[in-house]
Image (spheres, coloured by chain):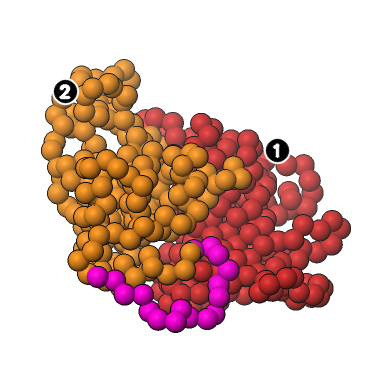
Chain colours: A orange, B red
């Protein structure tokens, strides 16, 4: 399986209850256990890690495409996605970093809508920690997948002629320029279970200098 | 199957070729036959009519959710989707009518990204033709599906208490207020076949008082 199942640190700051039937999670990212559970119960479905990522296009219209979930960043709720830095979503995200995932699990009939901000970690990134994460992501993918990043630029007109010789990739070398790591930091998750007709909305509570806290509320489907 | 397979009228105005390797379709909506073919080859998959619809949220961020393809409008390339008029996508579409579908066929490994403008046909619609379309849409869904539109308002906090008595719906009556027909009129379709690594971009050519013409171009995946 391509995703990691480590749950990371449990954030356990108790913050009491809000008014009404709004409940506060005593552990951060309570939606993460639901998502890991959905991944597990749908693990036999080969496309269960395929999700749909919406961004704002350069023309101000919505933009939407299928991508692959590559796991959580270790010890966090942040979601990893790999992409080609020459794809349109990169320029879109540099203009508007917000995205929403729509992810439907066909076996368990569960939908996750995960909204948040995406950080683009590409070849220009100088931060040592992010540089390392990108290198680790590159080393985690298959040689065949790596070759895709050496292909012609996505979106450009197709030219039938093949290059004179196939590009060669040293298996030990680091990521090629086109390889890009996207890190989605969720701030809202809308969970719907179509079997039980239960729906729950999770929202991150903005707080400075502390671990993220989440509030959750059951809402009508 | 919930979708209709009629191909509608063939628009056959020849318009000649554009420069480069850009080719003009001699029939409108050449992507429609690809989509109908994908629906056919994935028909045994019960979720093959589930697609992901991105809109622009009230906060200017992308919004994305799973919906069901309900077929093409007879004799056109327009796509029908049913929804609850109390759902957030309605207010979103009234502010920004543009949407993009991301639709992945898990059996044939085909992706369609269908971009266009959505018209909301709800209970307030006075146009006789649209009024009829909405009524036909309502009569096409099952009694169980109809009951969903009588449930409590989506997104509002869940209240555990059940209503004093179950709502009763006359099977012959027309659509309830909450039933809403969305009509997506595509102006761009990005088709990707992951088995053959072929990708084709279809664009509607704006033309006044004539049937829609489409140009298509093979691009890099």
Q: Is residue B12 left or right of residue B79?
A: right
For the point 34% across and 51% down, the residue is A123
Residue A14 - label: 2
Mark 2 Cα within 10 Å, few/some/many (few <14, many 20+)? few
- The secondary element bearing badge 1 is classed as loop
For the point 57% across and 45% down, the residue is A58
Label 2 lies in what chain? A
Horizontal and vertical percent position of residue B120: 65, 45
- The secondary element bearing badge 2 is classed as loop
Q: Residue at label 1? A: B124
Horizontal and vertical percent position of residue A220: 41, 37
Q: Is residue B47 left or right of residue A40?
A: right
Q: Which residues are magenta?
A: A154-170
A156 within the magenta span: yes
- Please identify the quarter of the rendering in which residue A11 is found: top left
Q: Nearer the viewer, residue A118 or B140?
A: A118
Horizontal and vertical percent position of residue A174: 25, 60
Most prominent secondary structure in the magenta stretch?
loop
- Tell me, yes or no, if residue B131 can be seen here: yes
For the point 20% across and 66% down, the residue is A172
Q: Nearer the viewer, residue B16 or B64?
A: B16
Residue B101 - label: none
Q: Nearer the viewer, residue B143 or A60?
A: A60
Position of the C terminus of chain A, as image quadrant, is top left
């Amino acid at each position: 399986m391509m995703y990691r199942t480590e749950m990371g640190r449990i954030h356990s700051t108790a913050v009491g209850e809000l008014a009404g039937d709004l409940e506060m999670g005593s552990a951060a990212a309570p939606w993460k256990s639901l998502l890991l559970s959905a991944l597990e119960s749908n693990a036999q479905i080969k496309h269960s890690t395929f999700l749909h990522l919406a961004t704002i296009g350069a023309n101000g219209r919505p933009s939407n495409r299928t991508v692959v979930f590559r796991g959580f960043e270790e010890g966090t709720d942040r979601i990893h996605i790999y992409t080609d830095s020459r794809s349109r979503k990169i320029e879109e995200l540099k203009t508007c970093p917000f995205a929403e995932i729509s992810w439907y699990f066909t076996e368990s009939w569960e939908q996750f809508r995960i909204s948040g901000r995406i950080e683009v970690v590409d070849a220009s990134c100088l931060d040592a920690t992010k540089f390392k994460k990108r290198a680790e992501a590159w080393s985690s993918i298959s040689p065949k997948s790596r070759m895709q990043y050496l292909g012609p630029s996505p979106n450009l007109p197709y030219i039938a002629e093949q290059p004179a010789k196939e590009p060669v990739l040293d298996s030990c070398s680091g990521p090629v320029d086109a390889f890009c790591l996207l890190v989605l930091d969720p701030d809202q998750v809308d969970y719907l279970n179509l079997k039980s007709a239960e729906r729950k909305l999770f929202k991150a509570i903005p707080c400075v200098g502390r671990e993220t806290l989440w509030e959750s509320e059951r809402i009508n489907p």
